[in-house]
Image (cartoon, grey):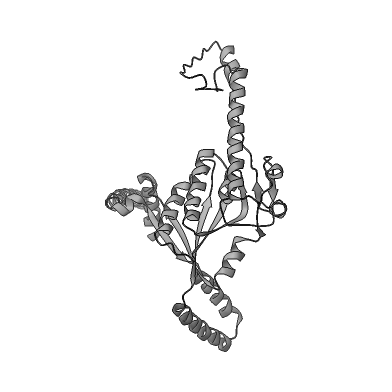
Amino acid sequence: MMEFLSEYGLFLAKAATLVVAVLIVVGGIVMLARRGDGPAESRGRLEVRYLNETYDTMALALKEATLPKKAFKHYQKQEKAREKQREKTERRRVFVLNFHGDIRAAAVASLREEVTALLTVAQPDDEVVLRLESAGGLVHGYGLAAAQLLRLRDRKFKLTVAVDKVAASGGYMMACVADRIIAAPFAVVGSIGVIAQLPNFNRLLKKHDVDFEQFTAGEFKRTVTLFGENNEQGRRKFQEEIEDTHELFKEFVKTHRPSVDLEQAATGEHWFGARALETRLVDELRTSDDYLLAASAAADLYEVSYTGKKPWLARLFAHAHETLGRF
């Protein structure tokens, strides 16, 4: 009898778990469908974080842990007085953006929205600090990212790019647009060059008696190919295209950062921050954390980030995770 009750109880527990899981999934689908009705949700969401408050909170926690109670109370009174004075004073604004680049420069989708938002509130004394991290990637993707930053420069925003880890190739194409570039001492900077590579499977196909046919209109519609038999004419044309892209890259750097000696810097090499300072690829050795903390003394800092609408399946799993966390 006891064994039967034990098995029956286990069955009920499994059944209840299954029912709860189904309800969570159904509820998630319904909620996501409702949330997707509004125009704001369909376009994503802009988030703004006041960094001064973050710094103040950290300082307060440390003061509370290290100061005697009487001294801490005195510190709190001073902080309240300073905060009231800060509210009365007209202070300049610094907007902080983050760009973590992959090979496709996918983050440009968020960057373009963030830049558009900033341009709606632009004032003469505003500054934008872009914390940039990218080893480069596709030319057209990073070309668009650099063009987004040029929108800020065209509207007279002061633009500072901070490189803590890497801004190479397409990443440096973005960085060179800035009024000022700061970099950590061992950040990787430069790589003003272009590379393209691809395998060719033509001999493998021939070995297995597989024909590959390709039809084009236009002498250079296709120069080199993965599966066809490449010839010297196609290789030469492809090399010309690579070299032309490199020339465009160098011209872009020369236009926006004329102090750089391109004969030395545009060889495709990269430099660590300290060496990049010598070649004038950057202006100062400094981390973004130090720059922003110093700026917070005289300016209001706002971190701006745009999150695009996620696919419904990703939103469903995220909602299910949040719901399960409440049990």
Instruction: Relative to 216, say whether 304 is above or below.
Output: below
Taking 39 as reference, is 262 left or right?
right
Vertically, is 110 above or below 299? Answer: above
Give percent across and percent down for residue 11: 34, 48
**What percent of the width, then of the height, locates residue 144?**
49, 44
Q: How many marks?
A: 0
Query: Is residue 265 shown left or right of residue 198?
Result: right
Identify which residue, 277 or 64, lies in the foreground: 277
Quadrant in the picture for the C terminus: bottom left
Viewer-closest of 94 and 17: 94
Q: Is residue 261 something one can see in this rendering?
A: yes
Instruction: Report if residue 8 is visible in the image.
Output: no
Q: Residue at x 72, y 55 (%)?
A: 274
Q: In this view, does 28 lie above or below 82?
A: above
Rendered residue at 49%/47% (across/down): 147
Which residue is farthest top?
209
Depth check: give the residue in front, 297 or 262: 262
Q: In the image, what residue occupies the spot 67% across and 44% down?
A: 262
Q: Residue at x 39, y 47 (%)?
A: 314
The picture places residue 49, in percent across and down from the top left corner, at 45, 64
Task: Place residue 251 in its image quadrant.
Answer: top right
Q: Residue 100: x, y in percent?
A: 53, 50
Can you say whether 270 is above or below 52 in the image? above
